[in-house]
Amino acid sequence: MEENNQKKFTVTAEILASHSQRFLNLLMDYIGQLFLFIIAFSIAVTIAETNGNKDFAANFVKNDIAQYTFVACISLVYYNVFEIFFARTIGKFITQTIVVDENGEKPNHERILVRTLCRLIPFEILSFIGMPARGWHDSISKTFVVNKNLLDENEDIIFDTKTQNGNSVKYELALLEKKGNQLFPIYTKDEYGRNVKLEFDNDEYNIIKISEYREPELIHDYQTKNKINVNTFLSKYLSKQGVKMVSKLNNKIIVQNEEDINLFVLKSDNDALRFIESLTERFVKLKRGDCMFVNDSSGPQKKYLYNLLEEKGFNKDFLYRKETTYSVGSSNLFKM
């Protein structure tokens, strides 16, 4: 149950760190490990010489196994400490990247340990050849290095668009390049999960990459007769002051704050359900207890809401409506 509440979105290709960011991470982290190596080795030499072992440094240089073991320990300590506590190393702080799991959350200790151990695989650095910029220590541990700013933007999209003008929609982000010698065709997935070759009717450009894109949904504020985004809804109607009750009635959301009642209209009953579930997950994650979410479609609850809203002057026929648009098909929308 807890895992379902925490899952917000799936990490997608457009927020992954680039090859140049990963290379800079590697370079900066090598420098960080070098400083740690110098400090640790100096301490080891001092302790050895204090105990009468004057040849410790000379013997260390001649012993390949000892060198590899010492360097491996430095690497394990460096990556485990930084990524367990911060999900970021020195290099990642500089490049504004961060390690996450497939749900965009901070990985647990076990995944970080597996991730760090996989760095010791011989020639592991060669696994970064190709697209996307993910190595074996990423794929084996099921972790991702992503742009932190883009990750934060994705997490801010609490409620995304699923229908447009009565049609089911799926937004995708396409990266274009001037036409040349494209080696491999680009495929996308249909609603059944099958790979479909992407045909792009343009004389100048080819699509070289395509990723899922989440378009923020707007909701109709009945009080102002304007469409507002979710952040405006949260700041204006669900501030931390007072205890609020948020209920669903058909394709409408009702916010009760003491004597104040505010109503919001969504495209469909299903959208209203998605919206209140998304809000519930958000508030659980933020550990906010100032809102009570009621997703009860039973007869007594609906009767209570109908009576309450009719007393406030809302039209009965309007309250009984479940849709503002009607689905007639589906489509894919590309942003390029």
Image: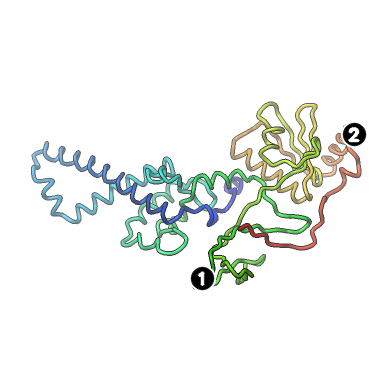
Which secondary structure, mark 1? loop
Residue drawn at point x = 71 percent, y = 48 percent: 274
- Left or right of 57 in this view: 126: right
Quadrant position of residue 308: top right
Percent of width and height locating residue 111 = 43, 51
Residue type at numbered disc 1: Gly
For label 2, the residue is 313
Percent of width and height locating residue 174 = 58, 60
What is the distance, in whole Å, between disc 2 and disc 1 at their CAs?
64 Å
- Of residues 333 and 112, the one nearer the viewer is 333
Q: Of callouts 2 and 1, which one flags the residue occurring earlier in the amino acid sequence?
A: 1
Quadrant position of residue 264: top right
Q: Are marks 2 and 1 in contact (CB under 8 Å)?
A: no
Residue type at numbered disc 2: Gly
- Whether residue 232 is situated above or below residue 22 in the rendered picture: above
- Left or right of 241 in this view: 72: left
Q: How many marks?
A: 2
- Binning the other alpha carbons within 10 Å of mark 1 as few (below 14), some (14 to 19) or many (20 upward) gives few
Which secondary structure, mark 2? loop
- Of residues 126 and 209, the one nearer the viewer is 209
Residue drawn at point x = 78 percent, y = 49 percent: 267
For label 1, the residue is 180
Percent of width and height locating residue 220 = 77, 42
- Binning the other alpha carbons within 10 Å of mark 2 as few (below 14), some (14 to 19) or many (20 upward) gives few
Residue drawn at point x = 41 percent, y = 42 percent: 93
Picture quarter with the C terminus: bottom right
Percent of width and height locating residue 22 = 40, 53
- Left or right of 35 in this view: 103: right
